[in-house]
Each structure stands twice: as structure tokens, then as C-alpha cells.
Image: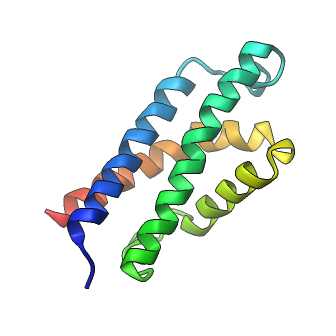
Amino acid sequence: MYDEEIVLDLLGKMAELTERIRARFKEVVSVSELTDSCAGVEKLDLLLMPLIVIGELVTKIDHITKQALFEKYPQIPWREIKGLRNVVAHNYYEVNAEEIFDTCKNDIPKLAETIKQIISDFQ
């Protein structure tokens, strides 16, 4: 078994990060807003850091739970989250702004809801 308190703390951090991404992305309506100006590139960078940390937290939780927790929630591509972290952290200049836009628009809301569900399932 694993320490549920530690996992809940990490899940809480993930929830905070998804909300941070949603707040930063709220005004973005097109990919070009992340690429066509210095302010846009700064916004892109502000979205990338929490995505890196989310990938790290998924890896950490997987390690703590021996991959048992996230397999109960197959609606989220957990392996892809870790893969995105690796691309952003190690190949920054290969980051595809369209993929980040799509991730923030479509995947982060689903991830946020699933994290809330996981936290609720612990209680």
C-alpha cells in the first residue's frame, strides 16, 4: 500500500496547476496568439511550465502507487502527459504550439475534472 496523504497532496498540486493553466489560457482563442508576438511567446512559456510540473507529478504518483492509481482512470492518457513533459523539458525548440493550444483547450479541462474525481474517490 502507499501513503494516501502524500498522493492526495500531489493530486491537490495537480489540481492547482490545471486551474493555473485554465486561467492563463482563458483569453487565448487561436494558436497565433501564442506564436506571433513576444507577449504570445511569453504566454506560451507560462503554459509550458505547469505542463512540465504536471508531467513530473504524474510520474511521481505512478512511482508511489506502483502504477495502480491512474490505471483506474483510463480516460486520461497518462503516458502522453509524461511524454509531453519530456518534450517540453528536453526539446523546448521542438514544442508544437498547435499541440499545446489543443492540450490547453481540450485536454486540461478533462484532466482537471478527472483529478477532482480521483480526489473525491479517496474520501
Find residue 62 and report its horizontal and vertical position in percent: 45, 73
- Determine whether 59 is above or below 38 in the image: below
User: Residue visible at 45% across and 41% down?
Assistant: 18
Tell me if 2 is positioned left or right of 43 in this view. Answer: left
- Determine whether 117 is above or below 45 in the image: below
For residue 8, which quarter of the picture?
bottom left
> Which of the two residues, 7 or 26, is positioned nearer the viewer here?
7
Find residue 90 and report its horizontal and vertical position in percent: 77, 54
User: Residue visible at 34% across and 55% down?
Assistant: 11
> Which of the two residues, 85 or 115, is positioned nearer the viewer here?
85
User: Residue visible at 56% across and 57% down?
Assistant: 55
Find residue 79 and report its horizontal and vertical position in percent: 60, 69
| Quarter that holds the N terminus | bottom left
For residue 64, which quarter of the picture?
bottom left
- Determine whether 29 is above or below 52 in the image: above
User: Residue visible at 21% across and 64% down?
Assistant: 5
Tell me if 102 is positioned left or right of 113 in this view. Answer: right
